[in-house]
Image: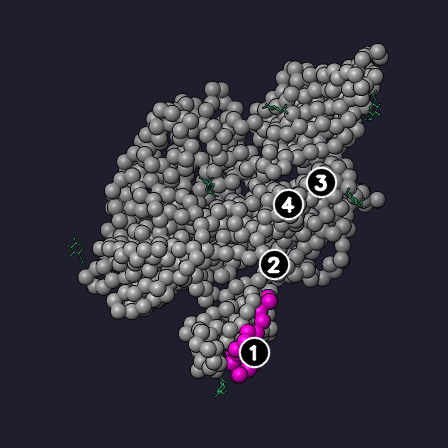
């Protein structure tokens, strides 16, 4: 009884009483104590409420103190003053999930997010307000920004979620990375930042406000650093601690691009070096990247997967060894919290990019030995001992004597993920499809829209971004004797539409899409026009709106022209400019308006002669959900481009037909040397994205419905559902360490390879080396591990025998099958 009362009392106290969050030049302070804070970004709309508890729990188990998120204005206010906080957009529920897990929250209200999110998080209706310019001293903009920011703050306050109210949120953010683009805004930009600071202060949230990448952040705003490395960052105020708000754990992917990877060694190196040089707050961008469901991907051209090579993969699985190696780093840094935040700092430079940093308090000292040299290992002599620090790595010694961690020495297992076929009962090898055409004949192909103008409009202005699709239609008349009719004619469109489809007189004449990052291109096709009236119908398709850069809101989207018809013969070329013709506009597609993707849709579908390679086609099939709890993906290989729904839930744009180029992938990835987005790419010559996440909460126990809208033409017969899980785990570790092998809550079924000595190769392709223990290492590991969900092995000569590897350090390489 007593302990229960004590517990209740404790919960009561901790949830009601305010936490005082402040800072000095050294660190964020919580209730007066300087803290080492490790935080990770998880964006709530990029997963589902059902996934949040597990993701946040894994964050906590991974050694995080805080979860950070943006707030996505355009998702919450899709139409002016009409709000949506339901489902994936339930910000308050997300923050409470963080609180329930006992973590802190960092709330980046922005409201500019960037984040590879559609339009950087701004609503398009905002852009379409008269006289609007974003992110400067524009009255209309400031009013709207203040209105939304205030509303979010009020919502969060009402639920007592700021630390000052006893809640989890320790930091709030206003604006975002404005310092990077500020130049073109001139004096107004500077005035705007002052206004942001005052406005934020006036909201009295009771926790510090941060401004990322803002070198002139006005007091008391804290400026912070975003980047791949932030160790050289110096805040603009001696009273601002060194904080890293976006440490990019990987990179995002674009249609036509490859899979980016940032090595575990390099992420760990960047974090350790940041703390070596006085940093005290680090946030991983992203800790879980997730999925760009529906039309939330920004860009243009950001893929539906936002995996980011983050410590938790798109589906929420541990991305090993990144997750585990960083967890070990967090544990070591936390164990040194006192010395890191209160210790006197001194540095010894050994030359050749090698250095030692000593944090000293009365109680003791902690050391970092850094080696920033890309090629050679360093031998550091310190207090009579000698330490080898591998190239491009940091060694951490919490007592300045014993090495507790080195960023380049990974002892965490590598997990190889596999996809398994759907083993649900009565799952046929191919789905049974029904189909129907997108209905265009009666309207758009006849040129009938909703509004007309004698001008080509930017797509955002017409659609308010309510849809990816905008029809631009016009008619052209040729008299019988028109000089054009005797010539070869072509239709030429100067286009800023990521994707364009063209129809003339109801006939499809082709499509084109932007490639290699060139969003302005010329579409030109030979066309037969007839005498009399001809209808030109152009379908412009956006694939996420721009989200970054000065004045990015006015980057063109759609068909901006000119549009012309060219007539050619041997001796003459004539051009007819159609740009100022009467253009008729229609937003969206018929099938979307009629919600063909809804399970209960009454529309007629045909099972007869299901077509392949047909543009503008809807497909539908039912399927059984894969058994178990492993994350589900749908393999859309064979399809072109379009949108997919499961039980009416939009799982995002798909585009498996977009193959990334053959070149630029590295066979081997060297973690040494500065990372950049083109380093360590994989997936060359493959579909940019073939698998699409279907969250478990979208699925029913019985029949489920998959609907596809295919724009370009594809073959759905290969489509199938799979689950993703750990297939095998590997480790490759020096003696005097322990390794933990785990199949993520499933038993280990076999040891495929094990050798103690100097084995070669990588996970999946290990080979015995020239020296090896005479003991049967496979047997030893089989006894220890097989049938168990987890086993811990001492990599020691006592356990594994003592092969003579002529003095060089012995390693255990092991591959276990899950
Ligand atoms: C936002 O503007 C609306 C009017 O459009 C007003 O009713 C509302 O009170 C404003 N909200 C805040 C928090 O200022
Ligand atoms: C830290 O530096 C201050 C000022 O130089 C000095 O007074 C203090 O004794 C130092 N503390 C330790 C533990 O060296
Ligand atoms: C297409 O139009 C843009 C302006 O919208 C112009 O900058 C570009 O030069 C044009 N391209 C061609 C090939 O005409
Ligand atoms: C049209 O083009 C074709 C092939 O390029 C050529 O053979 C034909 O002579 C051209 N006709 C005219 C009228 O220029
Ligand atoms: C679909 O089109 C592709 C490319 O044009 C072609 O290779 C394929 O054979 C076609 N498939 C069918 C089933 O018509
Ligand atoms: C390994 O082999 C040595 C002899 O070669 C033996 O003494 C030792 O007990 C063995 N260890 C294990 C764990 O089997
Ligand atoms: C300056 C810069 O490149 N900022 C980018 C940092 O990474 C985040 C997340 O990928 C982007 O949103 C920013 O645009």
Color style of the picture: one colour
Question: Is residue 770 part of the magenta span, yes or no?
Answer: yes
Which of discs 3 and 4 lies nearer the camera? The answer is: 4
- For marks 3 and 2, the one nearer the N-term is 3
Say which residue appears at 40% left-offset and 53% top-offset: 270
Callout in the foreground (3, 1): 1
Q: CB under 8 Å between callouts 3 and 4?
A: no
| Residue 750 pos. (x, y %) | 60, 74
* Nearest to N terminus: mark 3 or mark 1: 3
Q: How many marks?
A: 4
Residue 239 visible in the current orientation: yes
Q: Is residue 362 left or right of residue 764?
A: left
- Foreground mark, 1 or 4? 4
Numbered disc 3: secondary structure: strand
Decide which of 366, 144 is in the foreground and name it: 366
Residue of label 3: 710
Quadrant of picture, ligand 5: top right
Residue beneath disc 4: 661
Task: Looking at the image, tell me whether mark 1 or mark 4 is earlier in sequence order.
Answer: 4
Q: Is residue 784 magenta?
A: yes
Can you give x and y, in whole percent of width and height, for residue 151 in the image?
41, 34
Is 802 on the left or on the right of 750, as rendered? left
**Residue holding disc 1:** 778
Point out the tag, 1 or 2, that comes first from the N-terminus: 2
Question: Which residues are drawn in magenta?
Answer: 764-787
Please provide percent x and percent y for residue 201: 31, 35
Q: Residue at x 51, y 68 (%)?
A: 731
Q: Residues within 10 Å of mark 3 (few under 14, many from 20)?
A: many
Q: Tell me the crowding category of disc 2: few under 14, some 14 to 19, or many 20 or more residues within 10 angstroms, Cα based.
A: some
């Amino acid at each position: 009884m007593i302990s229960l009362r004590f517990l209740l009392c404790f919960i009561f106290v901790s949830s009601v009483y305010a936490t005082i969050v402040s800072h000095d030049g050294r660190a964020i302070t919580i209730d007066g104590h300087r803290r080492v804070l490790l935080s990770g970004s998880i964006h709530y709309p990029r997963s589902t409420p059902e996934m949040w508890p597990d993701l946040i729990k894994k964050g906590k188990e991974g050694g995080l103190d805080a979860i950070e998120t943006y707030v996505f204005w355009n998702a919450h206010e899709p139409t002016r003053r009409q709000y949506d906080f339901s489902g994936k957009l339930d910000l308050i529920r997300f923050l409470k999930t963080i609180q329930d897990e006992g973590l802190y929250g960092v709330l980046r209200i922005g409201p500019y997010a960037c984040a590879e999110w559609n339009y950087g998080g701004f609503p398009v209706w905002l852009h379409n307000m008269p006289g609007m310019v974003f992110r400067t001293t524009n009255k209309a903009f400031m009013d709207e920004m203040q209105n939304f920011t205030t509303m979010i703050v009020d919502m969060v306050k009402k639920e007592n979620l700021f630390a000052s109210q006893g809640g989890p949120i320790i930091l709030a953010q206003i604006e975002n990375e404005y310092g990077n683009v500020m130049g073109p805004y001139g004096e107004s930009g500077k005035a705007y930042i002052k206004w942001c600071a005052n406005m934020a202060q006036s909201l009295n949230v009771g926790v510090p406000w941060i401004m990322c990448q803002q070198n002139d952040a006005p007091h008391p705003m804290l400026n912070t650093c975003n980047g791949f490395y932030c160790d050289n960052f110096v805040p603009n105020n001696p009273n601002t601690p060194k904080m890293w708000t976006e440490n990019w754990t990987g990179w995002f992917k674009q249609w036509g691009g490859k899979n980016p990877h940032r090595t575990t060694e390099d992420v760990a190196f960047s974090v350790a070096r940041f703390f070596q040089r006085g940093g005290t707050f680090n946030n991983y961008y992203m800790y879980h990247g997730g999925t760009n469901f529906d039309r939330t991907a920004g860009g243009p051209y950001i893929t539906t997967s936002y995996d980011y090579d983050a410590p938790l993969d798109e589906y929420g699985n541990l991305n090993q060894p990144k997750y585990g190696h960083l967890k070990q780093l967090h544990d070591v840094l936390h164990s040194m919290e006192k010395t890191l935040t209160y210790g006197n700092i001194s540095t010894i430079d050994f030359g050749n990019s090698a250095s030692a940093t000593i944090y000293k308090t009365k109680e003791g000292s902690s050391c970092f030995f850094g080696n920033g040299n890309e090629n050679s290992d360093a031998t550091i002599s310190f207090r009579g001992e000698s330490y080898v620090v591998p190239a491009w790595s940091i060694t951490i010694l919490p007592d300045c004597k014993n090495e507790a961690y080195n960023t380049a020495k990974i002892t965490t297992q590598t997990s190889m993920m596999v996809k398994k076929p759907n083993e649900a009962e009565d799952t046929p090898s191919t789905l049974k499809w029904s189909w129907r055409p997108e209905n265009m004949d009666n309207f758009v192909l006849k040129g009938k829209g909703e509004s007309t103008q004698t001008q080509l409009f930017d797509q955002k202005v017409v659609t308010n971004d309510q849809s990816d699709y905008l029809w631009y239609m016009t008619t052209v008349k040729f008299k019988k004797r028109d000089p054009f009719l005797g010539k070869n004619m072509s239709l030429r469109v100067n286009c800023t539409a990521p994707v364009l489809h063209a129809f003339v007189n109801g006939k499809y004449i082709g499509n084109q899409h932007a490639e290699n990052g060139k969003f302005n291109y010329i579409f030109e096709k030979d066309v037969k026009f007839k005498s009399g009236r001809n209808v030109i119908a152009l379908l412009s398709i956006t694939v996420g709106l721009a989200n970054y850069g000065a004045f990015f809101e006015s980057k063109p989207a759609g068909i901006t022209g000119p549009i012309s018809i060219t007539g050619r013969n041997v001796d003459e070329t004539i051009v007819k400019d159609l740009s100022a013709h009467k253009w008729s506009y229609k937003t969206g597609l018929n099938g979307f308006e009629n919600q063909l993707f809804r399970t209960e849709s009454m529309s007629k579908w045909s099972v007869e002669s299901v077509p392949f390679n047909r543009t503008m086609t809807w497909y539908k099939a039912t399927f059984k959900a894969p058994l178990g709890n492993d994350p589900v993906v749908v393999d859309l290989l064979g399809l072109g481009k379009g949108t997919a729904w499961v039980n009416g839930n939009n799982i995002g744009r798909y585009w498996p037909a977009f193959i990334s180029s053959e070149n630029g992938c590295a066979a081997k990835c060297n973690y040494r040397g500065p990372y950049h987005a083109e380093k360590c790419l994989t997936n060359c010559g493959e579909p940019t994205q073939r698998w699409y996440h279907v969250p478990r909460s979208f699925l029913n126990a019985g029949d489920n419905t998959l609907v596809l809208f295919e724009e370009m033409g594809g073959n759905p017969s290969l489509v199938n559902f799979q689950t993703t899980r750990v297939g095998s785990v590997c480790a490759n570790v020096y003696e005097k360490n322990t390794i933990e092998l785990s199949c993520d809550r499933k038993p280990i079924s076999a040891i495929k390879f094990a050798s103690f000595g100097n084995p070669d190769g990588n996970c999946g392709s290990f080979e015995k080396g020239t020296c090896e223990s005479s003991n049967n290492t496979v047997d030893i590991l089989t006894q220890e591990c097989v049938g168990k969900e987890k086993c811990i092995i001492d990599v020691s000569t006592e356990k594994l025998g003592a092969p003579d590897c002529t003095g060089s350090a012995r390693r255990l390489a092991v591959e276990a099958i899950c």
